[in-house]
Structure formats: structure tokens, C-alpha cells
Amino acid sequence: MPPDAVWDRPAVIGAMPEEIRRLTAALARPQRWTRGPFALHRGRAFGREVTVAECGVGKVNAAALAQQLLVDGATAVVFTGVAGAVDPSLRVGDVVVSEDAVQHDVDVTPLGYARGCVPGQPLAWPADAELREAALAAAREAARAAGSEHAVVLGRVASGDQFIADAARTAALASEFGASCTEMEGAAVAQVCARWGVPWVIVRVISDTADFGASHDFRAFTELAAERAEAVVRGILGRLEQGA
Ligand code: ADE
């Protein structure tokens, strides 16, 4: 059984070790336990109790962990990590807070559904308004504190089980979905949280521009971008009402 205090606390998920490493290290009185394939870390950080966990890459991993955290009573879910830019005005290091999230690789169009639409679900899942505002405020404050002029935007996150490294695909994500960025997990967590009625938000920092240079840039910039995203999550945790 997990420790009792797994209930009634927010959870932070990242797909890769470098996306949650610093948050896990910052936990006071840390405890680690496992739920099936997932290692969960709980402790106190930035003024509140929190659970931090790594899901692995892709929508299935993300949905599986989100489901487990919600079964265990998570009160909110924050997804942190890196993304490829879809909006051509975004640069490596810019921050995207999810206004909503879509699954760009879902295709039930032969049955008359819009591209990206999971039958019976909305095309895009809206992020929680309070978490969104907390994330934007935290991201702006972190930028000020770092003396950095990178952009902080509210936008659509397009998730799919594909690493996008092709300018034509990126342009299609922009024109078909109006996406700001693309990654491989967020909308799966959004779908699970929406079905449970639990608030969620995604914070992504741009590691690449999802074009021919994406694989190189992803390797070069992921560590730095992930660190910036984690700094924003620290600010969100500090802003959450106790008991949220
Ligand atoms: N995560 C970071 N960059 C990405 C990209 N170009 N495609 C999908 N997921 C990503």
C-alpha cells in the first residue's frame, strides 16, 4: 500500500528523468514507493505536500500513470517537460502554458469526426483556469528572476505518439489545430483528468522547432528547457491553496 498521505495532494508528472529530477531532489522527507511499473516520490516542496513521478515517453505511459495517480486521490495534475515549437514565433527556451490540449494523431475522419477528435470526447480538453493562471504568473516571475526575456505564452498543446522533425508536419499542426507546441504526453493526461473531473495543466518549454534540426536541438537543449519548466512548476506549487 502507498503511504496514507498520497491522498489529497497535487501530482507532478514528467515523461523523462531530466524533466522531474530537480523536483524530486527538492522533496523534504522524501518517500518512494511503486505502483505497478511506476516509481512515485512524495514529500514536501515549496510549501506543500506533493507527489512527483516519471511516466515514460508517449500517450499510453502518460495515461496509465495519470489513471494511477487519480485512483490514489491526486487533487490536481501538473505535467512538466519540453516540447517542439509549432507556432513559428516561438524559440528554444520559450514557455508554453496549456490553454487546452488535443491529440493530433487521432484520426476517425472516415466516420465523420474532425481530425484529432476522440469519439464521445471534445476535440480539445481545456486546462483548469486557476492552474493556467498560476502557471502563467509563475512562468513570468521565473523569467524576471532569471533576468531572461524569453516568451511566456498560453497556447494549444498538440500531443501524439510521434517525434516531429519535419517542417511540413509542423506547418500542418499549426494550420489544422492552431497548436503552439507539440509533445507526446500532455493531451493523454488531459483526457484522463477531464474524465475524472480533476484539474490539470501542462507546462512545456521549447527544446526544438520540430523541423529538420529537431533531433539535434532536442538533445542539446532538453536539459536546460526541462530545468526551466521545473522552475515554473515550483512557482505553481507555491501558489496553490493548501488542500488544492
Ligand atoms: N518533445 C520535444 N520536442 C518534440 C518534438 N519535436 N516532437 C514531439 N515531441 C517533442
Image (cartoon, grey):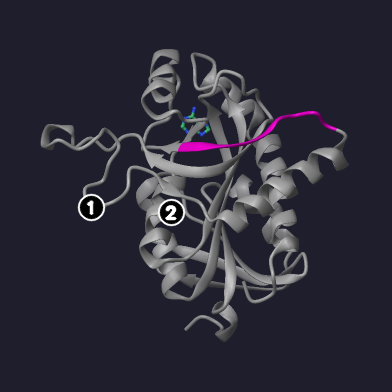
Instruction: Tell me which segment is drawn in magenta.
Output: 148-157
Say what secondary structure mark 2 lies in.
helix
The residue located at (54%, 15%) in the rendering is 213
User: Could you say which is closer to the camera, residue 82 or residue 115?
Assistant: 115
Sequence-wise first label, 2 or 1? 1
Classify mark 1 as within 8 Å of ligand 1 or not, answering yes or no. Answer: no
Percent position of residue 214, x then y: 53, 21
- Tell me the amino acid under the disc marked 2: Val
81 or 241, nearer to the observer = 241
Q: Find out whether residue 156 is within the magenta segment.
A: yes
Q: Secondary structure at mark 1?
A: loop
Rendered position, 66 above or below 43: above
Relative image position of residue 63 (x, y in whole percent): 38, 56
Q: Which mark is residue 120?
A: 1
From the image, which quarter does the C terminus lie in? bottom right
Number of the label disc, if any, that sits on residue 189: 2
At x 40%, y 13%, the residue is 168
Relative height, residue 183 to residue 9 (above, below): above
Q: Is residue 27 magenta?
A: no
> Which residue is drawn at the image coordinates 23% and 35% (left, top)?
107
